[in-house]
Image (cartoon, grey):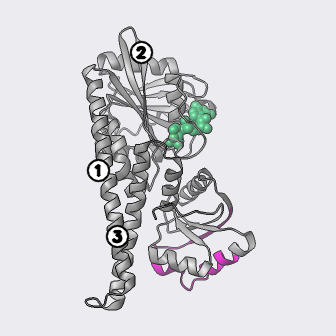
């Protein structure tokens, strides 16, 4: 009953510009997401609108445009870049005679495909059920209003109630299991803390190169690929820094703008690992045109999970892709380190990164926190390029 519905693989993207400043980027990202989900984008329909209007698709001819498009390209899925209400989704499916999903469902689908560990699978199922729940709830109130309320229960509504009860039960079970898994991790972390091992978490936007950096540091084989959300599970390894000095390095799930709330909540447990780190390596794709927005998005999530107090080094990664950028360390006006430029692909700059890790492990004072560097509008990368 809780199986993920099969989605097709030829897809038409629909994106309406409601005046968002980053419309084009978010469209590009949607394409990337679709590609990462193994879908092939065969057409795009775009439009412009001054405000998000639920009634937009009625009578504007836009739906017909999507319909014509579907006929000419033979696609079996339509993905909308913005949030659709369940009613909108149903109406659109009826009119287009094609499966319709939105960005959130697409991201959930990618997570469902990728989840590997027991805990990761539980988290994704929980997020999917919670997504489903909000839709059932809304469908329910909608029906209630139609029928005029009290004393008019139809068989359909009873079914909804049953569904809700069953899903509710499953949600509770999943939450219990996740709580147990969290306890276990807590115990493991406790053991690590006793040995006082310096712990470092790698965080950053999806596809920034976190796993590639992790692999180079640990000589491990974490899955790295040119797709969004290649990594879902936190992986940790012990790394030798210097005589008598080790660290535990953790690779984590990537962030993305408009990450569905249910997913943020579900992954909070895994990300909590991050809160207890002594240092964050915030990996940024320095060659990406939107790298500054990516940093803001990641810091937003870090603040949400209360990890914004932890010393943080911005690791400008992929400098091999930016002609003119060279490896180097960036310090603020107090001499504290807040950035380092490297290439995880070639290893360029890794001796600097290792030195920073070693010094921070022994002194704990050479790196600034994100809070300390907020407000400084100095952008060293631009100075360099
Ligand atoms: N040119 C170049 N490519 C890199 C570098 N670091 C990583 N990449 C590539 O960038 C892509 C993404 O790398 P990953 O390490 O999987 O990125 P990630 O941040 O772990 O991504 P998610 O797990 O999806 O969040 C891969 O194709 C890597 O080969 C680098 O320094 N230079
Ligand atoms: Mg990864």
Residue bearing mark 3: 164
Give the Cα separation between the discs numbered 1 and 3: 18 Å
Rendered view: 49 above or below 184: below
Disc 2 vs disc 3: Cβ atoms closer than 8 Å? no
Q: Residue at x 36, y 64 (%)?
A: 167
Look at the numbered disc 3 and give the secondary structure of its residue: helix
Quadrant of res 305: top left
**Left or right: 10, with 197 as reference point:** right
Q: Which mark is residue 176?
A: 1
Range of residues picked out in magenta? 42-68
* Image x and y of residue 296, in percent: 41, 46
Tell which residue pokes out farthest to the top in this image.
243
Give the Cα separation between the discs numbered 2 and 3: 52 Å
* Image x and y of residue 232, in percent: 47, 43
Tag in front: 1 or 2:
1
**Left or right: 16, with 365 as reference point:** right
User: Observer-nearest residue: 19 or 294?
Assistant: 294
Q: Residue at x 42, y 37 (%)?
A: 234
Sequence-earlier tag: 2 or 3 = 3
Sequence-earlier tag: 1 or 2 = 1
Q: Is residue 242 magenta?
A: no
Res. 309 visible in picture: no
Tell which residue pokes out farthest to the right in this image.
72
Q: Residue at x 27, y 32 (%)?
A: 187
Residue bearing mark 2: 241
Look at the numbered disc 2 and give the secondary structure of its residue: strand
Res. 143 visible in picture: yes
Tag in front: 2 or 3:
3
Q: Is residue 64 magenta?
A: yes
Rendered view: 232 above or below 316: below
Crowd rating for badge 3 (residues with CA inside 10 Å; few <14, some 14–19, many 20+): some
User: Observer-nearest residue: 188 or 162?
Assistant: 162
């Amino acid at each position: 009953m809780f199986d993920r519905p099969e989605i097709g693989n030829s897809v038409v993207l629909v994106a309406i510009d409601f005046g968002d400043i980053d419309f084009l980027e978010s469209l590009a990202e949607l394409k990337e997401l679709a590609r990462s989900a193994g879908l092939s984008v065969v057409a795009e329909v775009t439009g412009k609108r001054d405000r998000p209007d639920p009634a937009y698709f009625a009578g504007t001819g836009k739906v017909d445009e999507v319909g014509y498009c579907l006929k000419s390209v033979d696609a079996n899925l339509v993905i909308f870049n913005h949030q659709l209400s369940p009613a909108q989704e149903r109406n659109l499916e009826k009119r287009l005679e094609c499966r319709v999903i939105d960005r959130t469902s697409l991201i959930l689908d990618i997570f469902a495909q990728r989840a590997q560990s027991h805990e990761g699978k539980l988290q994704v199922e929980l997020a999917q059920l919670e997504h489903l729940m909000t839709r059932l709830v809304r469908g329910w109130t909608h029906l209630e209003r139609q029928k005029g309320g009290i004393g008019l229960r139809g068989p359909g509504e009873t079914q909804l109630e049953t569904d809700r009860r069953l899903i509710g039960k499953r949600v509770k079970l999943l939450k219990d299991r996740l709580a147990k898994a969290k306890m276990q991790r807590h115990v493991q972390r406790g053991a690590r803390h006793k040995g006082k091992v310096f712990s470092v978490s790698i965080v950053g936007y999806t596809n920034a190169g976190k796993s590639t950096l992790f692999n180079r540091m640990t000589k491990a084989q974490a899955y790295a690929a040119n797709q969004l959300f290649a990594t879902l599970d936190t992986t940790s390894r012990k790394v030798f820094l210097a005589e008598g000095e080790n660290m535990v390095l953790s690779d984590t799930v990537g962030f993305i703008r408009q990450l569905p709330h249910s997913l943020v909540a579900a992954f909070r447990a895994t990300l909590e690992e991050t809160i207890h780190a002594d240092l964050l390596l915030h990996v940024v794709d320095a060659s990406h045109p939107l790298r500054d927005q990516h940093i803001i998005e990641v810091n937003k999530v870090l603040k949400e999970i209360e990890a914004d107090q932890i010393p943080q080094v911005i690791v400008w990664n992929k400098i091999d892709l930016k002609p003119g950028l060279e490896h180097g360390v960036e310090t603020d006006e107090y001499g504290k380190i807040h950035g380092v430029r490297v290439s995880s692909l070639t290893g360029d700059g890794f001796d600097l990164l290792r030195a920073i890790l070693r010094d921070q492990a022994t002194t704990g004072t050479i790196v600034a926190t994100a809070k300390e560097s907020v407000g400084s509008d100095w952008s060293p990368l631009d100075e360099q390029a």
